[in-house]
Image (tube, rainbow, N blue to C red):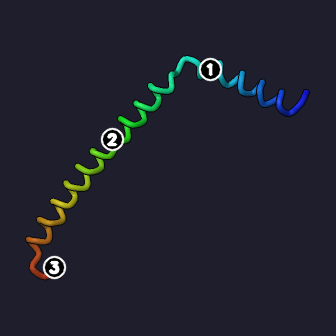
Amino acid sequence: MTLSGFFFGLADIMQIPLSFLQADMIGNIFNYSCIVLGFVGLFYWLNLQKKFNSAAENNPDQLK
């Protein structure tokens, strides 16, 4: 068995369990999840910033 035969056999074995997934489906799911995760992080950060701003307004000893 040559090295190229080994890698072609490995590729054939890897194609069997992954054949039901389409490349477009994987790409879209990944892209949409990145967008949703970005918006969740944005709203979390904006909520924290709102809390920090209100705490800074209520504390006169804090440097601004």
User: Where residue 4 appears, x then y in whole percent?
Assistant: 83, 31
User: Where residue 27 appears, x then y in whole percent?
Assistant: 45, 32
Residue 30's place in the image compared with 16, above or below, is below
Q: Name the residue type under label 1.
A: Pro
Q: Name the residue type under label 3.
A: Lys
Q: Would you identify the image quadrant in which residue 37 lies?
A: top left
Real-space Cα separation, disc 1 to disc 2, in angstroms: 28 Å
The residue labelled by disc 1 is 17
The residue labelled by disc 2 is 35
**At 13% from the left edge and 82% from the top edge, which residue is drawn?**
61
Verify CB contact (< 8 Å) between mark 2 and mark 3.
Answer: no
Q: Is residue 35 left or right of residue 7?
A: left
**At 35% from the left edge and 35% from the top edge, which residue is drawn?**
32
Q: Earlier in the sequence, mark 2 or mark 3?
A: 2
Q: Earlier in the sequence, mark 1 or mark 2?
A: 1
Real-space Cα separation, disc 1 to disc 3, in angstroms: 58 Å
The label on residue 64 is 3
User: Viewer-nearest of labels 1 and 3?
Assistant: 1
